[in-house]
Image (spheres, rainbow, N blue to C red):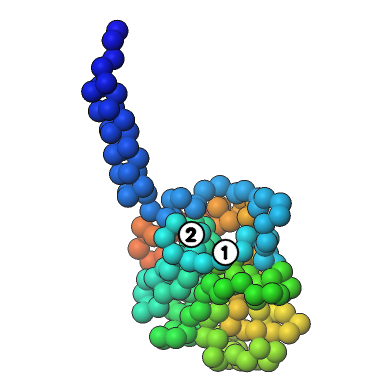
Amino acid sequence: MTVSRRTVIAGTALVSIAALCSDLVTPPALATSGGPRAVPEGIPVSENGWAIVESTGYGMAVWNSSVVGTVLSYDVRLGVVESVLTHLIQRYHYEVAPLHEGDLMGWKAPRSNVGAGPHSNLSSGTAVQIRPGHFPTGTGGGLFPAELASLRRILDELDGLVAWGGDEKEPDESLFWISANPSNGQLQNLESEIRSGFDKPGFGAGSRIALRWVVR
């Protein structure tokens, strides 16, 4: 069969248009989410083993995400990290203390001390500071007993996959981070538990019902 030049040009144009449309309809979240995978050797990582992100925005691993139920948004690594940390923030807002404008800080540009401590996790988009102005670094006891009890319950229901700076030797009670590395499949399981409560009235963030009761 003879293929004309016009046929080749038309076919090439269709392929180019299809590729362009694919780029336009594929959100950054789909491009960066997925199953567990280790960080390649030689890539700078934060303390928890996630790759450092140099900048944020379209096409990057870190994107600005709104927290439903609040007026807040923050820069966070897309995918399972976003799901887990946003759930934590929502529950903190409903069960620990109400959050207001300026009470949330996510990704920070990398510094020379990357890998030196839990604050380095901010530079990989896997950490968040909640009410950073309320808790001076190095000082504990900033939460009332009832607030602390609620926070402990939330962290327990997150299966230990989120760590709290209040438990560090030099505490920062505003700091929370993903404690599992990128290859830990438990994060996907936790995200599935969180998402299973989205369509069930009376469950999920703000219900004051234990997360595990949603699926067990």
Disc 2: CA contacts within 10 A as few (<14), some (14-19) or many (>=20) = some
Which of 151/118 is in front? 118
In the displayed image of the protein, which residue is found farthest to the right? 169
Give percent across and percent down for residue 164: 64, 76
All told, the count of numbered labels is: 2
39 sits to left or right of 97: right
Image coordinates for residue 179, horizontal then vertical, percent: 66, 65
Which is more N-terminal, label 2 or label 1? 1
Above or below 119: residue 100 = below
Q: Which quadrant, please, contains the N terminus?
A: top left
Label 2 secondary element: loop
Percent position of residue 5, x then y? 27, 21
Determine which quarter of the picture holds residue 169: bottom right
Q: Secondary structure at mark 1?
A: loop
Kindly identify which residue carries mark 2. Answer: 60
Amino acid marked by disc 2: Met
Residue nearest the viewer, comparing 158 with 18: 18
Q: Quadrant of residue 202?
A: bottom left
Residue closest to the far top: 1
Marks 1 & 2, CB-CB < 8 Å contact? yes
Which amino acid type corresponds to the residue marked 1 in the rendered image?
A: Val
- Per the rendering, the mark at residue 53 is 1
Q: CA distance from mark 1 to mark 2?
A: 8 Å
Tell me the residue at 58%/56% (across/down).
187
Q: Which mark is residue 25?
A: none
Is residue 205 shown to the viewer in this render? no
Label 1: few (<14), some (14–19) or many (≥20) C-alpha neighbours in 10 Å:
many
The residue drawn where x is 44% and y is 86% is: 102
